[in-house]
Amino acid sequence: MRLMICSVLLMMAFASCKTKVQDKEAVLNTEMHTFSNYEQVTCKHLDWKAIVDFDHKRIRGQATWSFENKSKAQHIHFDTYALGIKQVKVNGKVVTYNLGKFDPVYGSGLSIPIGENDSIVSIEYQTGPTAIALQWLTPEQTAGKVLPYLFTQCESIFARSLLPCQDVPAIRITYNADLQVPKGMMAVMSAKNPTERNPQGLYHFEMEVPIPSYLIALAVGDISYKAIDERSGVYTEPCMLDKAAWELSDIPAMMKAAEALGGPYKWGKYDVLIAPPSFPIGGMENPRLTFATPTIIAGDKSLVSLIAHEMAHSWSGNLVTNATWNDIWLNEGYTTYFERRIMESISGTSYNDMLWELGYQDMESDFKDFGMKSPDTRLRVELKGRNPGEGFTNIPYEKGAVFLRMLEENTGREKFDKYLNDYFQSNAFTPMTTKKCLEYMDEHLFNHDEALRKKLKVDEWVYEPGLPDNCPHTNPARFVAVDSARMAFEKGGMAKAIQTTAWSTHEWLQFLRKISHPLPADKMKDLDNAFKLTGTGNSEIADEWYKLCIASGYETAYPAMEKFLASVGRQKFLEPLYGEMMKSEKGKGMAKTIFSNSRSNYHPITALKIEKILKGK
Ligand code: BES
Ligand code: ZN
């Protein structure tokens, strides 16, 4: 008997010892891509004090978190990425913390002991040289070349390299920040922003509406503001300000269309920061302040659908947020659908049909690359244990959007719009899973009509790879005209016979995507002479044209293409061009030279991706 009690006691001691060890070491949750124990101890508010140090390319800061200990946990766990931790205090008292082993994708878990009644933890730290959320630019790498520049890009799991946080989209926090930046520089965040520079470089920010960590954002540089109306305006370098404000003058009209669809805008102001050319993506929906690439400033407002997209995230994503990165289609698919509805409202159906078709082509190209049976072509993707970045393909965007379009066409716009509006209002500020979304749909769109749900193949759309046979797809009338002009040209017609005066960027994209690759040298020359495509200031057209130039060996365009590759950091443009160059021996050499000359302009993650392409991976 005694032996039995002894062994039971021993087992208990072992078990409790085990839990303690587990508690102390923050363990990676591979489903949620976090080391944090956000469900047991939940962060609520961040008070961030920081100094932005351009000389050392680092931020020194103190992140003070207010938290709620829901389950009497003995530790609070945070995500960090390459942060140097200096000191940790809990309710004002210095404590011993544990920083776990570094993982190149997820970073390190930071475990801090807490008592039952504690509610505040303060972490003094500095960012590391490999902080993936940060891009530090020299003055030469900016548009105006006057001051250095810093911007952040935190989606999906990079906020942890800016500050210690519970880096999951399933919880929301409010924040305020006090920043010291070099004198003369402007700082803006995804928060209430100044419109004038502070001579001392001291800035205070408040974000009173709760947001997930991936929406924390900061930019510091030679940035000025110009209002478009009382709710919206543009932040950018002074040399870009007037051009950018003109290009984005449709924002108030877009906002009107967006509110008609999603309900009242809940974030106060809606401004756009036009970032320097090396900004690695098209746009980022940082609340109150979308960050966007300057490559949308085309001079003719032809690329502003990107702003409609980021604005739409103010509802889909920022208000109703994907609970996990597996549910990314809830952010990006809903947003792409929403974006198209805004564009339809401001530019009409015949214009918008072109956006749908180009999106459809992007989706088809992913189906071709991944294979129709690839699990990564499901709307709900499985990213457990993977880098969540792998989920950002055209599938969640375009298959997600066309799924919602199919629902709209089958249930009728009036009913669908009511569903959409209710979805945003009823689920505002909450995390959304795919399952919960489909349940909401069952109740509010299908009225529990099981037969209708089956007929529309909802489960196949969401949980199966490939594309169901009830996918809407219509060829836009404006592309029918482009296609016949292209065929006449391919059959021997002259370039100057093509009527392009009424063409928008989208007609050009259709023309350049569909034309035979390679195109004979005389045809390339004829096109270029007639339309001056080499050196075009329209980045979307430039990208398609240079791809065709590489495929056709049209060397006249190479110097301009090199310039484009050296100045633009947007991954979406760089990857296909480097990929195209790698298809020939001569191109491979060219790709290597251009990359080594341009690399310093690229975001570290972009540079890594291009490196992989150059290695043939
Ligand atoms: N939320 C995304 C940006 C993003 C994507 C961040 C992947 C991190 C990983 C943003 O809303 C977006 O979709 N941007 C697109 C533009 C849009 C018009 C399709 C982009 O950057 O190309
Ligand atoms: Zn998006």
Image: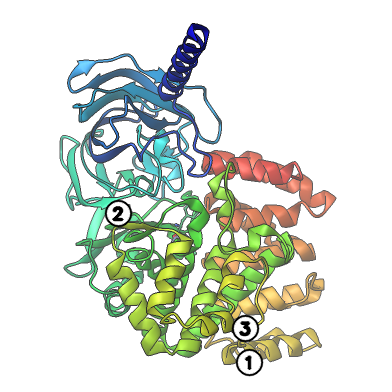
Does 9 appear above or below 190? above
Does 531 appear above or below 140? below
Indicate the quadrant of ligand 2 in the picture: bottom left
Label 1 sits on a secondary structure element that is helix
Residue at the image point whose x is 47% and y is 37% from the top: 132
The disc placed on residue 56 is none
Left or right: 21 as drawn, with respect to 122: right
Which residue is label 1 attached to? 481
Does 300 appear above or below 320? below
Residue at the image point whose x is 28% and y is 38% from the top: 43
Left or right: 244 as drawn, with respect to 25: left
Q: Position of residue 385 (x, y in %)?
A: 58, 41
**Label 3 amino acid?**
Asn
Q: Is mark 1 within 8 Å of ligand 1?
A: no
Foreground label between 1 and 2: 1
Residue at the image point whose x is 46% and y is 87% from the top: 411
Which residue is label 2 attached to? 238
Nearest the eye: 545 or 313: 313
Q: Position of residue 49 (x, y in %)?
A: 22, 31
Could you tell me if residue 97 is visible in this image? yes
The disc placed on residue 470 is 3
Q: Are marks 3 and 1 in contact (CB under 8 Å)?
A: no
Q: Position of residue 78 (x, y in %)?
A: 38, 31
Q: Position of residue 299 (x, y in %)?
A: 42, 71
Nearest the eye: 382 or 331: 382
Separation of disc 1 and disc 2 at Cα? 41 Å
**Label 1 amino acid?**
Ala
